[in-house]
Image (spheres, rainbow, N blue to C red):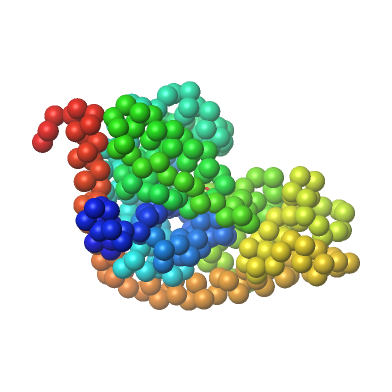
């Protein structure tokens, strides 16, 4: 991996680089899996990947320290349980690599207040956490840009809600390059065609989110009973017809998207297969597809969680490798900007 992530001149067979991160703000929910995590695994054969636990992003809202610490391990175990291979995919915690915050400070000086203030996530989170509108919530996308640009990443697998942040990352990189030459790689988003925005089960016009109340999302560790119960209660509509229309039938359309993305069926097929059947049928079919997807992941998760020493080794090794890659970008950036040589 170390050799594969060397510069193209040193290694002409170098693969393009992928970076993505997930916040340890709760156990992952089904939307995280469908929108992001499962693509991490699909992409690891063709790219050099870095998959980060973005703990510094998570503290933009209040977290309980002991719980946050535990969640970092749980996310690493979950990354491994879905099939990420630490030999091929570098797995580590954001706070273990100081280049993230150093680059974020520098890039913050090339980002406009207006750009940050109009980010949808900033508006949503400030509305949700009116008692704690801190500067970190505003500068959150600059840290995300630093995460990505620190490793000269080419592709960033994300759900649809992060598209705006990725566009800002591109703008920052282009602005920086216009001043200093071709220093930063301008990344592309990788957003799945189906399942890029899984919606809340109880409020299907809002995205499913792990920091919302438990009954609104399916946790990746939910038992089969919990999955069935939550889906049974999922909000639909009074029309009793199974057809995709995200505007006027958000609940049913959401269930159809979940089913499609887990089974590979098309929306058309579902409409045909469930023609004349009630919503109860659709809900049970979705529940069984979810249970079948989660079962092997949950048993692998339990196995990885039982060896904390091995998890420590993986993130320590990941951080060491990430640091050495980050140092190279930081050396160039410091020099270009004109900071005093060390
Ligand atoms: P939080 O509730 O703490 O803000 P979250 O559940 O929204 O967290 P993140 O950690 O912010 O999740 O997101 C991790 C990845 O999962 C991102 O790539 C994000 O786009 C994707 N993602 C999050 N929610 C969904 C969703 N409902 N549907 C599809 N993708 C999603
Ligand atoms: N902002 C993302 C999490 C995140 C991320 C990243 C995703 C932080 N840094 C870098 C991709 C690449 C979120 O809230 N889901």
- The percent coordinates of residue 263 (x first, y second) are 65, 69
Residue beneath the point at 54% across and 51% down: 191
Q: Is residue 338 visible?
A: yes
Q: Is residue 53 visible?
A: no
- The percent coordinates of residue 329 (x first, y second) are 25, 43
- The percent coordinates of residue 193 (x first, y second) are 61, 55
Residue beneath the point at 77% across and 65% down: 270
Q: Nearer the viewer, residue 218 or 242?
A: 242
Q: Is residue 98 above or below residue 232?
A: above
Q: Is residue 10 above or below residue 139?
A: below
Residue beneath the point at 53% across and 42% down: 163
Quadrant holding the N terminus: bottom left
Q: Nearer the viewer, residue 8 or 277?
A: 8
Quadrant holding the C terminus: top left
Q: Nearer the viewer, residue 133 or 6?
A: 6
Residue beneath the point at 31% across and 44% down: 150
Q: Is residue 52 left or right of residue 263?
A: left
Q: How many marks?
A: 0
């Amino acid at each position: 991996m170390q050799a594969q992530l060397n510069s193209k001149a040193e290694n002409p067979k170098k693969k393009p680089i992928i970076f993505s991160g997930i916040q340890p703000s709760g156990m992952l929910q089904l939307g995280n899996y469908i929108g992001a995590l499962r693509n991490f695994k699909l992409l690891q054969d063709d790219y050099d990947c870095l998959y980060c636990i973005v703990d510094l992003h998570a503290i933009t809202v209040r977290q309980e320290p002991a719980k946050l610490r535990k969640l970092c391990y749980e996310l690493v175990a979950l990354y491994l349980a879905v099939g990420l291979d630490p030999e091929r995919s570098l797995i580590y915690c954001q706070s273990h690599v100081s280049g993230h915050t150093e680059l974020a400070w520098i890039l913050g000086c090339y980002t406009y207040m207006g750009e940050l203030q109009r980010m949808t996530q900033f508006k949503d989170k400030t509305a949700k956490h009116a008692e704690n509108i801190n500067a970190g919530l505003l500068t959150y996308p600059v840290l995300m840009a630093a995460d990505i640009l620190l490793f000269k990443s080419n592709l960033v697998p994300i759900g649809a809600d992060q598209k705006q942040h990725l566009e800002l990352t591109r703008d920052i990189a282009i602005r920086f390059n216009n001043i200093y030459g071709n220093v930063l790689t301008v990344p592309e988003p990788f957003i799945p065609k189906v399942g890029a925005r899984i919606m809340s089960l109880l409020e299907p016009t809002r995205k499913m989110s792990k920091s919302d109340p438990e009954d609104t999302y399916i946790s990746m560790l939910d038992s089969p009973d919990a999955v069935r119960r939550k889906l049974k209660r999922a909000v639909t509509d009074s029309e009793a017809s199974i057809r995709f229309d995200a505007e006027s039938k958000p609940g049913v359309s959401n269930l159809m998207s979940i089913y499609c993305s887990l089974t590979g069926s098309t929306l058309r097929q579902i409409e045909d297969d469930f023609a004349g059947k009630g919503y109860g049928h659709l809900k049970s079919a979705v529940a069984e597809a979810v249970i079948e997807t989660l079962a092997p992941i949950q048993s692998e998760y339990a196995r990885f969680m039982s060896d904390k020493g091995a998890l420590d080794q993986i993130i320590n090794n990941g951080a060491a490798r990430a640091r050495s890659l980050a140092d190279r970008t930081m050396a160039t950036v410091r020099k270009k900007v004109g900071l005093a040589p060390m």
